[in-house]
Image: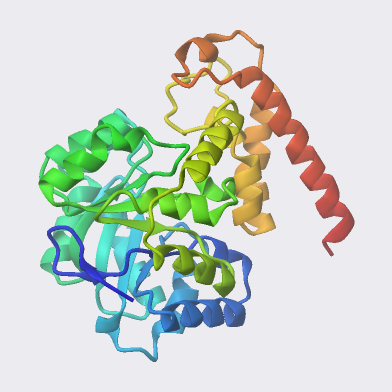
């Protein structure tokens, strides 16, 4: 498979990476098999995080018999302070069974407060600098769902790689972030190219992304067949047809009324409801192991039951989502999933 230089790094990467969340749902043997099959297809980029359960361990097991220089590994830490960040780097190295990680992210810099914490003296960025000096990490990166913070971090000129949600529903990065990344020669990883599992047409999703040169799509992969389907699209470099463009517009209209972009402009909620977490029920259930989904969603759903329909969130949402109604819908959806799980799980 063709490879390209990734931004200002010296890494040669394939136009698609393997996202490491879904293999949390698999046994170690199954996960190792999937990772190795994906690598055998020519994909050389794997993305994971300390917070993705046992994903790093499974990837490490899959890679231990391969030449390290043949695979580009990216991981992440959500730590805000230097000490914990460095502990996470060492944990990642141990789990991945390697002595260096190519790209390491400050994970989820989604607010002004978080950005200040990670960048201040004694913050996680200092830990990232130290890890690079010690040879544990090669290139500094960050991930974010929030465009204002992403832009500020890019303009700081302290990072070589950025990871942002980008798909044909979540198109905000088109306006400033992708042009800025191109201008600054930063590697751009398109997180959630399938909308966190909500976009089911891989042909449309990846043909749309192929319009933007230089980005690496990072879909979560649970089955090798999923990557095979994606590669068929990527290796057939034709532009979107008029019919496909019309289909994208139709899906945008259908999902746009319910698709949460996780910008969190709706917050703070007077009842402390984590709105974006509640609106992720379908995506979380589809991508995470059941135990993790319960741990993530149960507290959020309980808070959502306290909604007073004050409608303050409606005034703040830039996408005009009917948030109180969507909270009710996701509460019901979660209850259905729990009922089904009680009937089927041992």
Looking at this rendering, what residue extends furthest in the front direction? 242
In the image, residue 179 sits, relative to residue 232, either above or below, namely: above
Question: What residue is shown at x 50% (from left), y 69% (from top)?
Answer: 227
97 and 180: which is toward the camera: 180
Residue 54 visible in the shown view: no
Which image quadrant is residue 128 in? bottom left
Give the number of marks.
Answer: 0
- The answer to whether residue 20 is left or right of residue 174 is right
Looking at this rendering, what residue extends furthest in the bottom direction? 65
245 and 105: which is toward the camera: 245
Q: Position of residue 145 (x, y in %)?
A: 38, 38
In the image, residue 19 sits, relative to residue 152, either above or below, namely: below
Question: What residue is shown at x 64% (from left), y 18% (from top)?
Answer: 324
Question: What residue is shown at x 30% (from left), y 45% (from top)?
Answer: 80
Quarter the N terminus occupies: bottom left
Which image quadrant is residue 84 in? bottom left
In the image, residue 249 sits, relative to residue 51, either above or below, namely: above
Q: Position of residue 50 (x, y in %)?
A: 41, 61
Residue 283 visible in the shown view: yes
Which image quadrant is residue 214 in? bottom left
- The answer to whether residue 306 is left or right of residue 202 is right
Tell me how the rendering is colored: rainbow
Q: Position of residue 284 (x, y in %)?
A: 61, 48
- The answer to whether residue 268 is left or right of residue 307 is left
Q: Position of residue 261 (x, y in %)?
A: 47, 33
Looking at this rendering, what residue extends furthest in the right direction? 343
- The answer to whether residue 277 is left or right of residue 142 is right
Quarter the C terminus occupies: bottom right
62 and 8: which is toward the camera: 8
């Amino acid at each position: 498979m063709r490879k390209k230089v990734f931004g200002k790094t010296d890494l040669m990467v394939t136009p698609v990476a393997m996202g490491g969340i879904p293999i949390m749902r698999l046994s170690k043997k199954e996960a190792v098999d999937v990772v190795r099959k994906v690598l055998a297809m020519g994909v050389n980029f794997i993305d994971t995080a300390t917070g993705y359960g046992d994903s790093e361990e499974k990837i490490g097991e899959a890679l231990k018999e391969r030449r390290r220089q043949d695979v580009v590994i990216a991981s992440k830490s959500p730590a805000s302070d230097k000490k914990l960040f460095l502990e996470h780097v060492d944990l990642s190295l141990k789990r991945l069974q390697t002595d260096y990680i190519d790209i390491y992210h400050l994970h989820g810099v989604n607010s002004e407060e978080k950005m200040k914490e990670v960048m201040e003296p004694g913050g996680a960025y200092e830990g990232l600098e130290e890890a690079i000096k010690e040879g544990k990490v090669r290139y500094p990166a960050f991930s974010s769902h929030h465009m204002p913070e992403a832009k500020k971090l890019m303009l700081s000129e302290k990072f070589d790689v950025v990871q942002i949600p980008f798909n044909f529903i979540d198109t905000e990065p088109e306006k400033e972030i992708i042009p800025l990344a191109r201008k600054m020669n930063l590697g751009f990883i398109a997180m959630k190219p399938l909308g966190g599992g909500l976009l089911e047409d891989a042909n449309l999703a990846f043909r749309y992304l192929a319009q933007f040169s230089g980005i690496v799509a990072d879909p979560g992969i649970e089955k090798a067949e999923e990557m095979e389907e994606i590669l068929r699209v990527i290796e057939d470099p034709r532009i979107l047809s008029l019919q496909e463009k019309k289909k994208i517009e139709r899906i945008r209209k259908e999902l746009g009324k319910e698709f949460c972009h996780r910008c969190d402009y709706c917050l703070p909620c007077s009842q402390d409801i984590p709105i974006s977490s509640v609106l992720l029920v379908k995506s979380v259930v589809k991508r995470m192991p059941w135990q993790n989904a319960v741990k993530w969603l149960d507290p959020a759903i309980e808070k959502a039951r306290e909604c007073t329909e004050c409608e303050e969130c409606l005034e703040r949402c830039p996408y005009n989502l009917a948030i109180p109604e969507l909270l009710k819908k996701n509460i019901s959806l979660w209850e259905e999933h729990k009922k089904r799980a009680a009937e089927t799980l041992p």
